Amino acid sequence: MKIGVMGTGEVGSTVGGKLHALGHEVVFGSRSPGSDKARQLSAETGIPVASHQDAAAHGEWIVNALPGEQAIATLTGCALAGKILVDIGNYEAIVHGPIATPLGLALQAAFPTARLVKTLNSVSAHLMVDPASLGADHTVFVAGDDAGAKGEVEALLRSFGWRSILDLGDLTACRAMEDLVPMWMRLFGKFGDPNFNLLVARQS
């Protein structure tokens, strides 16, 4: 599958690298595709780096790994109509207090013809793509208004190695999912490393 990954930071490059390793045709979207950083990333991963518009045009799916504060402006003008848009981003400001409109909902409102699915936003980058490396069961959440798109994203998550995938329903769940970020930061401060995640266990 052809996938445009928007963002070349730690999260975007990690997820893009995993998708590439699984055989998908990935293009990174960057605001500076000709920079030394972009050339280094391409050399290290074997993945082309293009403008956000060109990466979106390439992708049958789009992964948003941009900071929330930049996402709508960056994605405006990109070819998103009818495509699955996997939002794994957060507002950086969520750490300091509540956000009026969760990023997932804001993106769906800005790009109503995209098939948006929210997931992976409360997991560290290395666990996103290698959940088994934690050595314990843990849960990833998904939410979206399009049941078919959610099913396809869940299949992708399983290809990453996820076993505990919890569908929280429609995109109103984005608020709860994004509100997990301050808890993640608190736990990171407690443990001193990102090698943790939450497990939802329920009596059968």
Image (spheres, rainbow, N blue to C red):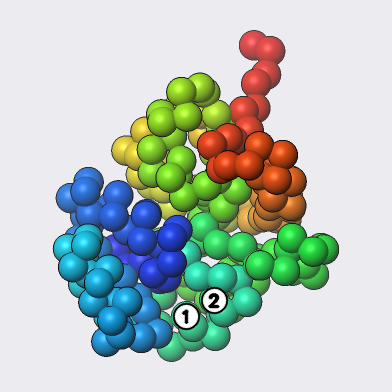
**Vertical position of residue 159 compared to residue 53: above or below:** above
Q: Is residue 23 visible?
A: yes
In the image, is 156 to the left or to the right of 95?
Answer: left
- Residue sitting at 25 percent across and 72 percent down? 40
- Residue sitting at 23 percent across and 77 percent down? 39
Quadrant position of residue 93: bottom right
Assign the C terminus to one quadrant of the image: top right
Secondary structure beneath dot 1 equals: helix
**Which of 94 and 155 lies nearest the eye of the viewer?**
94
Q: Is residue 180 visible?
A: no
Point out residue 132 in the picture as x, y percentages from the top left corner. 41, 29
Q: Which mark is residue 42?
A: none
Point out residue 97 in the picture as x, y percentages from the top left corner. 82, 63
Looking at the rendered structure, the kind of residue marked 2 is Ala
How crowded pointer 2 is (Cα within 10 Å; few <14, some 14-19, many 20+) is rated as many
- Residue sitting at 18 percent across and 50 percent down? 23
**Which of 5 and 104 lies nearest the eye of the viewer?**
5
**Vertical position of residue 204 compared to residue 65: above or below:** above
How crowded pointer 1 is (Cα within 10 Å; few <14, some 14-19, many 20+) is rated as many
In the image, is 55 to the left or to the right of 6?
Answer: left
Residue at the disc numbered 2: 71
Considering every residue shown, the one lying at the far front of the view is 192
In the image, is 105 to the left or to the right of 98?
Answer: left
Point out residue 69 in the picture as x, y percentages from the top left corner. 63, 77
Residue at the disc numbered 1: 75
Looking at the rendered structure, the kind of residue marked 1 is Leu
- Residue sitting at 22 percent across and 46 percent down? 22
Secondary structure beneath dot 2 equals: helix
Assign the N terminus to one quadrant of the image: bottom left
**Which of 136 and 24 lies nearest the eye of the viewer?**
136
Q: Are circles 1 and 2 on residues that touch, CB within 8 Å?
A: yes
In the image, is 19 to the left or to the right of 98?
Answer: left
